[in-house]
Amino acid sequence: MKTTLDEIVSLCKRRGFAFPGSDIYGGFANSYTYGPYGTALKRNLKDLWWKLHVEQLDNIVGIDGDIILHPRTWEASGHTATFNDLLVDNKDSKKRYRADHLIEDQTGIDVEGMTPAEVTAVMAEHEIKCPVSGSTNWTEVRHFNMMFQTEMAKTGDGAMAYLRPETAQAIFLEYKNIIDTMRVTLPFGVGQIGKAFRNEITPGNFLFRRLEFEQMEIEYFVREDAWEEAFAQWQGRIKRWCEIIGLSNERLHWAEHADEKLSHYSKRTVDVEYEFPFGKKELYGLAYRTDYDLKQHAEHSGKKLIYRDPHTNEVLVPHVIEPSFGVDRSVLALLCDAYAEETLPDGSTRTVMRLAPVVAPVKVAVFPLMKKDGLPEKAHEVVAELRALGVVEYDQSGAIGKRYRRHDEIGTPVCVTVDYDTLEDGTVTVRDRDTMAQERIALGALREHLAGKYFVTPSL
Ligand code: GAP
């Protein structure tokens, strides 16, 4: 049976992955707080991404730029003029929509690249109805810039600023500093993880489309004639990343953008789409940004953003390949992929999150069989012994079966139970989340056994 988004949302609330935001004030539309397990999952994902893409690849360095950059950044990048969605209001329901989404949902027609006037005409011709009022009483379709504006305390030029809609631009702004301080030679990349903000007209689908979200991005600088090779190399790396974090290959698809769908800066974009419960949607993007950004910032700032070949002294403006990974969409895809409901041989059912150990919020759970007779003390010793593997949780409340079920729902790959035999022969029961098979392992060999079976560090 197909997993629904409601099942995922409910498990997230029940088990502390994500809560509806500002709940004590009656909630705040489309806002969510990552709970302790969601936070751990997200942190594991970001740490792993940084380790594999920035620390372990030879020619990548990392930066941590500001959310509020000089406002002229967005003029140069083209976001002020073109980072727009098509907005339309229904005069009866007073509801606001993205016109392109309404039209696509009701007719399957893709209006990408059309002007607001043309889209208004399509709405009329196809009698697009408001999902709430059912009427066709619309305003004209108009452009709506998706950047969040904010006012700075200082007055005069630059008083109005924007929250960055993508992390990428800070990398272009620091291009010269990177060239001047790091011994980078082409091809090389600059990675960054951070928040981005978009005033989405219709956010929704839980963590999928949010007003604030996180991105993990790399701007990979290459010679122009090497862009195709680099693009293919990054496609391979993205595929491998998806495999490492545990996304099912059969739910992932590559979607090439048609020319009229390309962003203003891109000559080629391929999305990685994932089969979410609400349809096949963009998870990540890979774009060939050409030399657009460096040239734009050079022109607007008056600074030279160039590369000088250390051997030949040739001067050129590098071209850019950009793999862009959404953190929140990764978390949602992982939760959807991991979720399973199973009927067990005894007829009972269980919900289990089959998260890859590398991203699982709790690595090992340790239970004393009883809350007495020295079993808790022994279990605490086991916790201390296993800490090097990551988060190890101690749990002594309730029947042992219930404790297993709780950790199945959290996605803990392995549970260790300390019982009376442990005190006699120094062995513990190790229970595998996925197969539910149990084995006895000697305490002296436990950490190595778990490290080798569950926690082998992957590489790209
Ligand atoms: N720098 C390129 C860029 O920002 P994008 O396709 O607009 O490209 C990249 O965004 C990724 O950021 C997407 O593939 C998605 O994972 C994530 N993303 C974009 N908008 C989002 C939103 N409103 N909520 C959550 N994630 C979002």
Image (tube, rainbow, N blue to C red):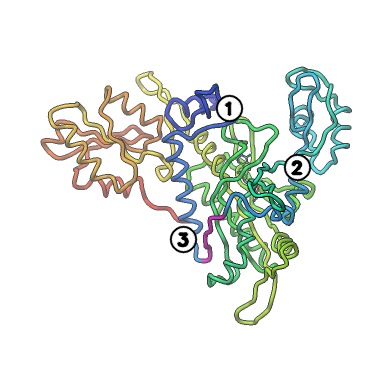
Q: Nearer the viewer, mark 3 or mark 1?
A: 1
Horizontally, residue 288 falls left or right of residue 388, namely: right
Which residue was labeled with disc 3?
A: 56
Q: Where residue 312 appears, x then y in whole percent? A: 64, 82
**Looking at the image, which residue is at 37% across and 51% down?**
456
Left or right, residue 95 beside residue 196: right
| Residues at marks 2 and 1, CA–CA distance in whole angstroms | 24 Å
Question: How many C-alpha atoms fall within 10 Å of the one at disc 3: few (<14), some, or many (≥20)?
Answer: some
Alpha carbon distance from label 2 to label 3: 37 Å
- Judge the density around disc 2: few (<14), some (14-19), many (≥20) Cα neighbours within 10 Å: some
Q: Position of residue 90 (x, y in %)?
A: 79, 24
Which tag, 2 or 1, sits closer to the chain's start?
1
126 sits to left or right of 388: right
Disc 2 on helix, strand or loop? strand
Give the labeled residue for mark 2.
84
Q: Pick the residue in front: 112 or 115.
A: 115
Spatial distance from mark 3 to mark 1, Cα to Cα?
40 Å
Magenta stretch contains residue 63: yes
The quadrant where ligand 1 appears is top right
* Magenta region includes residue 111: no
Query: What's drawn in magenta, residue-wise?
Result: 59-65
Of marks 3 and 1, which one's residue comes earlier in the chain?
1
**Pair 2/1: label in front:** 1
Residue at left offset 71%, top offset 41%? 146
Q: Are marks 2 and 1 in contact (CB under 8 Å)?
A: no
Residue 28's label in the rendered image is 1
